[in-house]
Amino acid sequence: MAVCLASRTGRQLQRYDNLGRRLVVGCIPYRFKNGEDGVTSDELEVLVITSQKGRAQGLMFPKGGWELDESLEQAALRESIEEAGVLGNVERELGKWKFLSKSQGTLYEGYMFPLLVKEQLELWPEKDVRQRFWMSAGEAREACRHWWMKEALDILVARVTSPMKQNEQEEEEENVISCLLS
């Protein structure tokens, strides 16, 4: 897949709600950690990035303006490519938050999506102004500077771990039944 190596700039295509709030879209890139034997485990890892001003400003998930010529999902994927250099599958929305922009002092409305990472690029548009870090969900929650992104992460963790917990519980119940029948 060819990736444009320039980020979109300017706000001429930017979307705003009927109250004048800027609409932003972000994603939480995630994967399941590969074990030493090359087998994928059920240990969740998420990708966080620095702001353009550096790590001292705290870590976050990729996000940016939702533009008139794209869907929410397309905007989430574009931001993940531009800011974090990852491609993948945008999944069902995690939620919508209203938050105050610290730099602009205005209310924004933000939508967050999970992004199951399929490919990590060596070159991406903001490679020279951002760093990216894979970490556990707990570490990311601790390092993330935005409360609303932490809430989105909590939803993602609950969503992706509940099927695993359900499978473990079913296996445990099967073991108990087997023991009782023996």
Image (tube, rainbow, N blue to C red):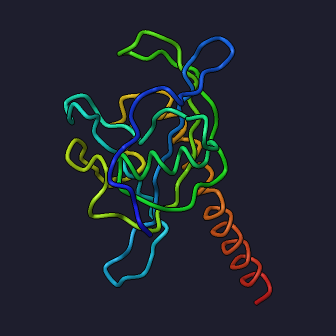
Given residues 106 and 45, the one toward you in this image is 106
**Which image quarter is the C terminus in?**
bottom right
In screen coordinates, is 157 left or right of 135?
right
Given residues 32 and 121, the one toward you in this image is 121
Against 56, residue 163 (above or below) is below
Against 48, residue 34 (above or below) is below
Q: At which x and y percent is residue 124?
A: 31, 55
Q: At which x and y percent is residue 171?
A: 67, 75
In screen coordinates, is 155 left or right of 32?
right
- Number of marks in the image? 0
Q: Residue furthest right?
A: 181
Residue at the image position 45 percent from the left and 61 percent from the top? 87
Residue at the image position 22 percent from the left and 30 percent from the top? 53
**Which image quarter is the N terminus in?**
bottom left
Residue at the image position 50 percent from the left and 40 percent from the top? 26
Residue at the image position 46 percent from the left and 66 percent from the top? 32
Say which quarter of the image contains residue 10: top left
Say which quarter of the image contains residue 90: bottom right
Q: Residue furthest front?
A: 12
Against 87, residue 112 (above or below) is above
